[in-house]
Amino acid sequence: MGLVSFALKYPHTFYVVAALILFLGVTAVVEMPTDIFPEIDIPVVSVIWQFTGLNTTEMEQRFTTYSQYAISSNVNGIKDIEAETVDGISVQKLYFQPDVNLSLAISQVVAATNAIRSLLPTGTQPPIVVQYSASAVPVLQIALSSDNLSEAQLYDYGIYRLRQMLAPIHGVTLPTPVGGKYRQIMVDIDPVKLLSKGLTPLQVVNAVNVQNLTLPDGDEKIGKTDYTVRMNSMPPTMEALNDIPVAYQNGATVFLRDIGHVRDGNLVQQNVVRADGKRSVLLSIIKNGNASTLTVVNAVKHMLNIAREAAPPGMGIKSLFDQSVFVVSSVVAVLREGAIAAGLTALMILVFLGSWRPTVVVMISIPLAMVTSLVVLYFLGETINTMTLGGLALAVGILVDDSTVTIENTYRLLDEEKMPLPRATLHGAAEIAVPTLVSTLAISCVFTSVVFLEGPAKYLFTPLGLAVIFAMLASYGLSRTLTPITIGQMLKGQHNRAPNRPLPTPRNARPGGRPATGGGLLRSFPRVVRARLRTYAGRLCRATQDSADPAVDRSDRRRPRARSRRRDVRLCRPRFLSGDRRRDGPRTSGHPHRDDRADFPERRGQDPSGHSEKRPRSHRRQSRGACALLQLGVRRRDDDRGQ
């Protein structure tokens, strides 16, 4: 009651809190990353070795075996190792325990693989260490095609121009383009000429490597001037490469042009990409795990518009795959279902409560609870995805409980207990604080169990459970603070229309001022239907009572006035157990229940001798089941006529 009374005493404080929640909610929705699924952080690292020209058996013996031995001996927290070896490539997947610090594990893997390079074949390059993430998937694919540019030119533009333009975008990872031809200076050797000179291909390779070097030269200080010496031995043009001396035989120098020629060519093509039937270059845009798909795709599309204007004539830049379309459609679908659920919930509240005022109160608390959940998820680093929004949509039907119970209890105190509105608002929210808290915690415990899952299921369903839990807790807090304040403001005009006169008793009220169950539902029907229901109910009730005992005279059809069930001090039993209050015959005093006690000195239902006594049929309670329609708020027309 302390929190409710504080809220009613200082309502403007909670108005400000509600405004703060809305502000933070809008900020969280704008800033939170948007994706289809939550970030799935699986601790997997891939180690890739490359050595061109080595067959599968040698790669397995020289690289895979040594690498696995070094990694298993020097890296902690490894759960499993998988390896796949092909010609010139060895790929190893390292699965770590869930509690491993992945950054430390990657540094240990790099140190272990570099330590064994001395045991590997000469010229082995360091391996490529890549962290695997299920969330790092291609979100956009770009195809480069042209009718007047070669595949090598397309590949060069994709890897050196377009890739550099897209690299500064936050959350983007750009792998090597697929398709096209990798530009390379090729030396074509004529076998006949090479044999006539008595040379081997290895001599040609060594001669080109020796004559094609960039060496540090230093500087030369002459007098007061310091000169930079340039002795770059790399040929500037392909024609200069043809003049490289290969050997000296019989007093003559053999040049490269004598045994072959140098051309601007490309590496042997290993893959081909076709877009609309034409050979193209495919560039994939991969999103990092903590980035927003919509943000990344929109930024890349904006940069592509600039790249199209600066592209060479005849080059086409086209998007082949766009994952943002699926993200937007999935998010919109979940939002639509959530809106339908909220609308149906509001309709049910309107029908059964029979007034638009409590419906407005409930519809204020539901969005605030959902926004509060989004704010907490934002500070926890979660994203807006189908699982998060699905949890909020699932919680819509549960969020109405706290506010609806508070409103119904307030109405009960107003109509039955005849409390003034301020007291009814205070006690209506405070009396149900503990039961609603238990109900909220029970539902929260069900969804808390998702945090004990393991593997990908943990990353998928944990945001869903957290969204429901935070929304439930926020709903309970609002039902104790903002809901009583809103009830007091909304019902002030409804219950204070005539302050100097008592409120009129509803026509469907039962004796004692207690409203009949379902009155809100009947008030939603038209007046003609309600009158017809009253007529039919009165006829049915009279016919049922007459058929129960036609010999009993019921000239006085007025219902007895309800009495409070106070305890009989002398018999230690309630009044209604002391005898039949509707006995026929004279009554000696104004308290028939006291006079009837003489006829029943023993237990109820026994005569003075102790034998069981059967009560007359007319003394039984009349037609309890036949008057069931009166419990729906229908009052007999004869009651008004008799009174």
Image (spheres, rainbow, N blue to C red):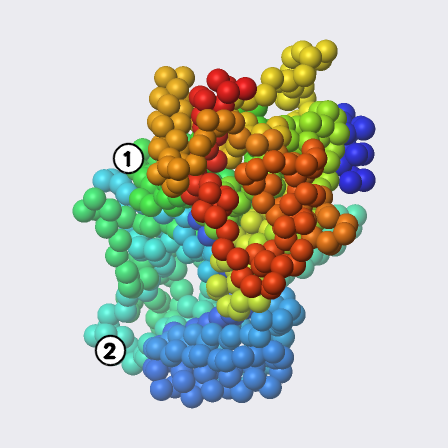
**Residue at x 48% of width, y 35% of height:** 631
CA gap, disc 1 to disc 2? 47 Å
Q: Is residue 76 above or below residue 130?
A: below
Q: Position of residue 580 (x, y in %)?
A: 58, 45
Horizontal side of 453 relative to 240 (left or right) equals: right
**Residue at x 40% of width, y 17% of height:** 527
Tell which circle, 1 or 2, labels the residue nearer the N-terminal end. Answer: 2
- Closest to the observer, 407 or 566: 566
**Which of label 1 and label 2 is nearer to you?**
1
Give the residue number, with chain letter if any, for mark 1. Answer: 314
- Closest to the observer, 393 or 524: 524
Residue 585 seen from this side: yes
Q: Position of residue 275 (x, y in %)?
A: 24, 46
On-image quarter of the N terminus: top right
Q: Position of residue 521 (x, y in %)?
A: 45, 30
On-image quarter of the C terminus: top right
Give the residue number, with chain letter if any, for mark 2. Answer: 196
Label 1: few (<14), some or many (≥20) within 10 Å? few
Label 2: few (<14), some or many (≥20) within 10 Å? few
**Residue at x 54% of width, y 61% of height:** 612
Q: Secondary structure at mark 1?
A: loop
Q: Quadrant of residue 115?
A: bottom right
Q: Is residue 455 above or below residue 340?
A: below
- Closest to the observer, 560 or 512: 560
Q: Is residue 282 above or below residue 631?
A: below
- Amino acid identity at mark 2: Ser
Horizontal side of 115 relative to 269 (left or right) equals: right
Q: Position of residue 271 (x, y in %)?
A: 28, 60
Q: Quadrant of residue 243?
A: bottom left
Q: Is residue 438 above or below residue 545?
A: below
**Residue at x 64% of width, y 69% of height:** 101
Q: Secondary structure at mark 2?
A: helix
